[in-house]
Image (tube, rainbow, N blue to C red):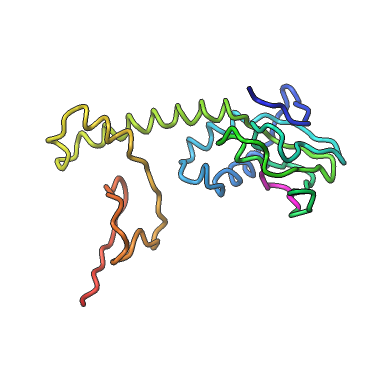
Amino acid sequence: MIMRDNVEYSGGGVIDEADMGEIRKALKKHFIFSQLNEKEIEFFTKEMKPCSALRNNYIFKQGDKSGSYYIILEGACQVEINGEKKRTLNYGDSFGDLGIIYNAPRSASVFALTDCELVEINRNVFKQVMDDINQQHEKENKKFLEVLTFFKELTEEQKNALASTCFTETYDEGQVIFNQGDDANSFYVIKQGTVLIKEKNH
């Protein structure tokens, strides 16, 4: 069961393009969504619902049941832990992320310092979108593994198991993937781009 927070939903509310850009930016910089591509980020932006919170009201309190994640499109909020003011959130900031991952009580209170315009996604919708994305990833991984000679001796069952555990990581040009001497705990297959390998002589 999803606990509804102290917000009001604006049925049929339209999010303008500038705010949509800010929503995409907020999602991309958050660890939950950081490995998603543009198309996958778009799945989430389409599912986010506009809502509002009134000034001088708690959107939720520490210890409340959780269930929704919010991004601020207008206004300011204050985060409090054990009654102590911790930080102020403004346009483009987000909160409530643990509420869509874990079925655990809220770890902090969020207080609306001003009237606020927000967008929200709840845990049920988040899980459904993530399930859809993961199923698509699994299909793409299986298709990719099929053309690699390294895995040609694997059975279908083994390929399916491997495809379900693979995930995509994206690296910027010039970024180090790992250094010589690091613990070897991952196997990489280049899906797109070029990698330079450097070896230090001892």
Furthest residue to the bottom? 202
**Which residue is painted at 45% across and 28% down in the image?**
131
* Residue furthest out toward the right: 56
Who's the residue at 48% across and 31% down the image? 130
Residue at x 18%, y 40% (from the top left corner): 148
**In which quarter of the view is residue 58 placed?**
top right
- The residues colored magenta run 88-95
Q: Quadrant of the C terminus?
A: bottom left
Seen in the picture, residue 83 relative to 173 is either above or below; the reply is: above
Viewport quadrant of the N terminus: top right
Give x and y (percent) for residue 113.
84, 46
Q: Quadrant of residue 14?
A: top right
The residue positioned 60% from the left and 28% from the top of the image is 47
Estimate the x, y position of residue 87 in percent, counting from the top left: 74, 54
Q: Is residue 32 magenta?
A: no
Q: Position of residue 196 (x, y in %)?
A: 28, 62
Q: Is 149 placed left or right of 180 in the picture?
A: left
